[in-house]
Amino acid sequence: MNSSHEKNANEPLNDKPSLLLVDDDETFCYVLNQALSKRGFDVTVAHNVDDATLIAEKHLPEFAVIDLNMPGPSGLVLVERLKALDTHTRIVVLTGYASVATAVEAIKLGATHYLSKPADADDVVAAFYKEEGDSNTPVTSKPMSVNRVEWEHIQKVLTDCNGNISAAARQLNMHRRTLQRKLQKRPMKN
């Protein structure tokens, strides 16, 4: 479902590096598309994993920016699909719900980097070219809150269940609707 401001996947390729931007937030996509285009990328936008997969199968992107939480399959599924199509695709996973478990899974599946929203175009471009870790990153000694620990645990179980909410709810000994409500809430910062 391309709108007038988004590039059509069937348009001819040019000499700019190709970038696939996948996020269900159309406003965010519009803004990031404009910013990344100004930085020299040929941006194609999709709003879900299945549409993004179809686009990538026709025109392999050199770069991808993928939101983790979208209707349907998660962004982790798309990371895996893109890496299966081309192991050289540089992928940055974005999420408004940062989780240690999902960050680890994204990197294991082949993402280049993982950023929490809000991230701007400069953050994304820098993440594409980040080749190694930064030992100067501050390590916090402040313990996580109980709510944050719960969120991290839920994310780990959900990842272990391949995003299947019913299976995760069973493993957590929780009603499926209760788990869905918890997933709709933003996690505590720490």
Image: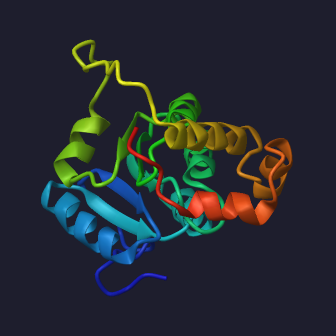
**Color style of the picture:** rainbow
Q: Is residue 134 above or below residue 74?
A: above
Residue drawn at point x = 43 percent, y = 47 percent: 188
Q: Is residue 2 above or below residue 107?
A: below
- Residue 172 shown left or right of residue 47 in the figure: right
Question: Which image quadrant: the C terminus?
Answer: top left
Direction bottom: furthest residue: 4
Front position in the image: 20 or 155: 155
Could one spot residue 116 in this view of the protein?
yes
Give the image location of residue 156, x and y in percent: 65, 37
Direction front: furthest residue: 146
Front position in the image: 155 or 47: 155
Give the image location of residue 162, x and y in percent: 74, 46
Give the image location of residue 189, x and y in percent: 38, 44
- Residue 9 shown left or right of residue 49 in the figure: left
Give the image location of residue 23, x and y in percent: 44, 65
Could one spot residue 86 in this view of the protein?
no
Residue drawn at point x = 65 percent, y = 59 percent: 73
Total labels drawn: 0
Direction left: furthest residue: 38
Front position in the image: 156 or 39: 156
Residue drawn at point x = 52 percent, y = 65 percent: 55
Residue drawn at point x = 41 percent, y = 33 percent: 112
- Residue 169 shown left or right of residue 66 in the figure: right
